[in-house]
Image: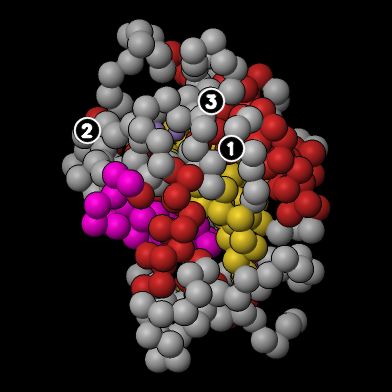
Amino acid sequence: MATAFNQPLGGNEMIRSGGIATMMRLPTTTDYADIDVGFIGVPFDIGTSNRTGARFGPRAIRAESSLLRPYNMSTGAAPFDSLQVADLGDCSINTFNLLDSIRLIEEFYAKVFAANIKPISLGGDHTIVLPILRALNRHLKKPVAIVHVDAHADVNDTMYGEKIAHGTPFRRAIEEGLIDTHKMVQIGLRGTGYSAEDFDWCRNQGIKVVQAESCWYQSLAPLMQEVRMLIGDTPTYISFDIDGLDPSFAPGTGTPEVGGLTVTQGLEIIRGCRGLNLVGGDVVEVSPPYDTTGNTALVGANMAYEILCVMPGVRYA
Ligand code: MN
Ligand code: MN
């Protein structure tokens, strides 16, 4: 076992408003050797249909993450005691070409997975989950289970005639056999649709759809117990669209929908993933231009940290 795991730069070593804005003030590296979990930014937002700005998400999340300390006082998780974690920087994209960007993201993540690193990605709009899942499938050579938090199902067939956009990634991933749909859950879906049957396609694929209304006023811990039973030890990816949370908590996003999940429910979902065979995760759709207080990025940073805390191999106090 390595004797010196990377540690976030402490608040008593450098004032929290100072220092280089890596995720949680961790060291940044492009050397993938011996890294267990890597935070990666994907500054991509040319798949958005409404408000843009998620390309600035990684920087804003990193900036707000400077407040985070190493130990999870709620769950006892001590991720930096047993895992080698680093900020692997950003995946470069071609902002003038969506399909080329998708290719670049897949190639970037293929190298990450080949190094047996579990990525926690900072979006970027939700389009990025498709090339990440493609790369993951190249590595695992089998479909993954999915915990998907979102106001939207993101299973449109096309948007403006295009097959790849931020509202289509799970449709494509399912068509391509990247996901075990009977081990997929979508939590927080709501709002207005293009047709009354918008969520039926998901249910017809075998996906467990948990609309936001059925989450109102209650703890999601029992739901997550069901989810853990459903998924078992299948490799699992968690995709957290910040718009799954209510816009009162997370207004800085491209397609906000009222009546969403609370922050505590978001925490319950991620913490409820403890024990799953997680192989990666993301927090997407944080759009700083609409995030006047920085709170959406702060919430996003916390959710990314919580994903780290439930990665396999994390030591608990
Ligand atoms: Mn989404
Ligand atoms: Mn969404």
| Residue at the (47%, 79%) spot, across then down | 19
On the image, the x and y values in percent for residue 310 come to 52, 60
Which amino acid does the dot numbered 1 rest on? Thr
Quadrant of the rendered structure where residue 71 is? Answer: bottom left
Name the residue beneath numbered marker 2. 258
Q: Quadrant of ligand 2?
A: top left
3D distance between C-alphas at marks 3 and 2: 22 Å
Quadrant of the rendered structure where residue 198 is? Answer: top left
Which amino acid does the dot numbered 3 rest on? Ala
Q: Tell me the element at label 3.
A: loop
Name the residue beneath numbered marker 1. 95
Residue 247 falls left or right of residue 297: left
| Residue at the (27%, 24%) spot, across then down | 191
Q: Specify the segment rendered in magenta.
A: 289-313
In this rendering, the label closer to the viewer, 3 or 2:
3
Question: For residue 298: magenta?
Answer: yes
On the image, the x and y values in percent for residue 66 come to 41, 72
In this orientation, which residue lies closer to the viewer: 233 or 129?
129
